[in-house]
Image: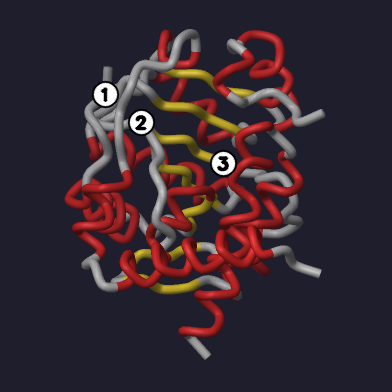
Amino acid sequence: MATAMEHARRDEWRAEFDAAARRSLRTRFRYAFLHTYKPVLDDAGYRSFDTTAAYREWCARNLPPWLGYGPAV
Amino acid sequence: MARRFEYAQAEEIRDAFARHGVRYLFIGKSGAILLGYPDTTQDADLFIEKAATNNAAAARALLELGFPLNDEQVAEIERGKDFVQLKSGPFDLDLVFAPDGIEDFEQAWRRRVDVEGFPVCHPDDIIRSKEAAGRVKDREVLPRLRAFRDYWVERNR
């Protein structure tokens, strides 16, 4: 059973979705895409991996944990 | 460092990929944003059908878009790596040929959503992919993304 807090969160999200739906796609792009430096990840212009699993493993081994690319425990 | 991804650049991808006949879908958070999901992200993720002719067409389109791929990198894309990350072009782009949680491009293609000419994965596929990837940042976004999926389905019923 959803708690009052969960209901409030859902209502808040719905208001955000409604607001986004009123914006044009061009405006949504302006708000959505940002660029900030991500250490290690942004330090090479090109990377390729034979498998997606190999990419995930590389992220887990090489990226700072706070970037959030490691596996959720 | 690449500039942030802009609407005009998404149009350039759409148009260049159409000219070269590339089969692809926007996926990940960038796909969700195209569908109307309000959030922020840094790059665009494209799910590209892994097939020799399609890989080669994608490489040609990327060169046309200004991505400085050398011969070896073009050959890798043509051969079909599962994941290619481009950070030295006009914007950051992840090419995903085998996303987690999605078995087959064709099935995802059949479920795709057209957003002003942009082919986008269905929200269920975006969610499946994030569930299967299982990264910290995916787990954090999933509850709100699932709520958006419900909202989106209701609006598009």
Chain ID, mark 1? B
Determine whether B133 is above or below B29 in the image.
above
- In the depicted view, which residue is nearer to us: B91 or A72? A72
Please give the label number shown on residue B2: 1
Residue at mark 1 shares a chain with residue at mark 2 = yes
Chain ID, mark 3? B
Determine whether B146 is above or below B55 in the image.
below
Residue at mark 2 shares a chain with residue at mark 3 = yes
Please give the label number shown on residue B96: 3
Residue at mark 1 shares a chain with residue at mark 3 = yes
Assign the N terminus of chain B to one quadrant of the image: top left
Mark nearest the camera among 2 and 3 is: 2
Could you say which quadrant of the image residue B21 lies in?
bottom left
Residue for point 49% across, 16% down:
A41
- Residue to which mark 2 is pinned: B92
Q: Amino acid at mark 1?
A: Ala
Q: Secondary structure at mark 2?
A: loop
The answer to whether the residues at label 1 and label 2 have Cβ atoms under 8 Å apart is: yes
Q: Amino acid at mark 3?
A: Val
Q: Earlier in the sequence, mark 1 or mark 3?
A: 1
Count the marks. Answer: 3
